[in-house]
Amino acid sequence: MNHAAEPLQQVDRVFVRWRGRRLLYFAGCDYYRLATHPRVLAAVRRGLKAFGLNVASSRKTTGNHALYELLERELARFFRVEQAVLVDNGYLTNLAVAQAFKGEFTHALIDSRAHGCLADAAVLLGAKVVSFAHRDAADYERQLHRLGAGVRPIVLTDGMFAHDGSVAPLDRYLAALPANGVLLVDDAHGAGVLGKAGQGTPSHFGLRDARLIQTITLSKAFGAFGGAILGPRVVAQAILAKSRSFTGATPMPLPIAAGALESLRVFRANPQLQARLHANVLWVWERLRAAGVQLPDQPGPVLPVAPASPLEAERLKRRLLAAGIFPPLIRYPGGPEGGYFRIVISSQHTRPQLAKLVAALI
């Protein structure tokens, strides 16, 4: 059978088992390792015992539950928005928004390296799709100006980009956006990582604007599963009324919702998690730069290493394995043809573990 990638077994918070070896794991998106936090796992077990696995019905019929509404209220409070709407997963968040607002925009401006779910959402919106250069505010402004008068644009971009931890210049995008426009930010990787108390990329720029819709996943920084759309109440009302992916789908399993709620509580009660993550990132970045390694200027905990040749990739893979580190060589749509090493720092890595990584990379 042709698998998407070779299987890994995560054996604890910073290790995996691969081909019979226990290796340090600098990859994935569980930035705080909350997916294995004892309190989160206990909440899932309690939820399974109390609620069973599945409500087996849409929330628009008989499948709603007080736990979903509680999680939505807690997410809205944490991210300081009027309302949150849960959907089954992070990929669906932007599709639900597009279904809710289909036909209401004349143009959809999209970052050329936006996540695939945003590209799919742009098509669903039924607007003319216009691409602008990756994270290029000047090109975005040029494309916006070319649309002329009497348009209503929606802008689609990631907040923090998964491939390298860079961020979109959301402040520039909003400043140039007409009053009738909307900025849709897929913040799957920024939520929990950037901004005040982990409120995401808009918070990183100090933005609070009724034209901004933030979509997140609970499967990365929060270590659970499911997606949420965050924004003004009118956005939530449109999704509940018009989005078929919301009205026609069975919601996330209740034990997972219980785990996500507990994860949010753990994260909120432990601000040192975010501080430790960024301290770890700074520690690694400083040592790599001191050794002459050229690093991009970005705030996220992701270090992309693109080998110049298959031979160079094999050499780095061997160095990492010799240091007891899993070699995260990935091939992802839109990335380098031969793949690249996506190195990811977590809050739970120790300094000796980080030192091993630095030594292997230089």
Image: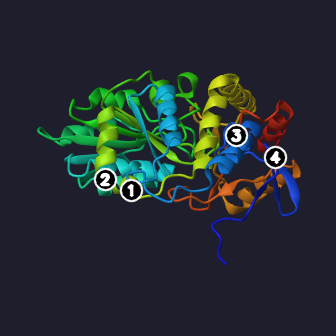
- Circle 2 packing at 10 Å, graded few (<14), some (14-19), many (20+), is many
Residue that carries the numbered disc 2 in the rendered image: 99
Image coords of residue 32 (percent x, y)? 69, 36
On the image, the x and y values in percent for residue 260 come to 60, 41
Callout 1: helix, strand or loop?
Answer: helix
Among numbered discs 3 and 1, the one appearing first in the sequence: 3
Quarter of the picture containing the C terminus is top right
114 sits to left or right of 211: right
Q: Secondary structure at mark 4?
A: loop
Give the quadrant of residue 179. Answer: top left
Q: Residue furthest left?
A: 150
Give neighbour class at mark 4: few <14, some 14-19, many 20+ (Cα, 10 Å).
Answer: few
Cα–Cα span, label 4 and label 2? 40 Å
Mark carried by residue 12? 4
Q: Identify the amino acid type marked 4.
A: Asp
Q: Which residue is mark 1?
A: 245
10 Å crowding of disc 3: few (<14), some (14-19), many (20+): many
The amino acid pointed to by label 3 is: Val
* Mark toward the viewer: 2 or 3: 3
Q: Secondary structure at mark 3?
A: helix
The amino acid beneath tag 1 is Ser
Q: How far separated are the C-alphas under marks 2 and 3?
A: 33 Å
Mark 3 or mark 2, which is nearer the start of the sequence? 3
Q: Residue at x 61, y 56 (%)?
A: 53
Q: Indicate left or right for 94 with 225 as reference.
A: left
Q: Are marks 1 and 2 in contact (CB under 8 Å)?
A: yes
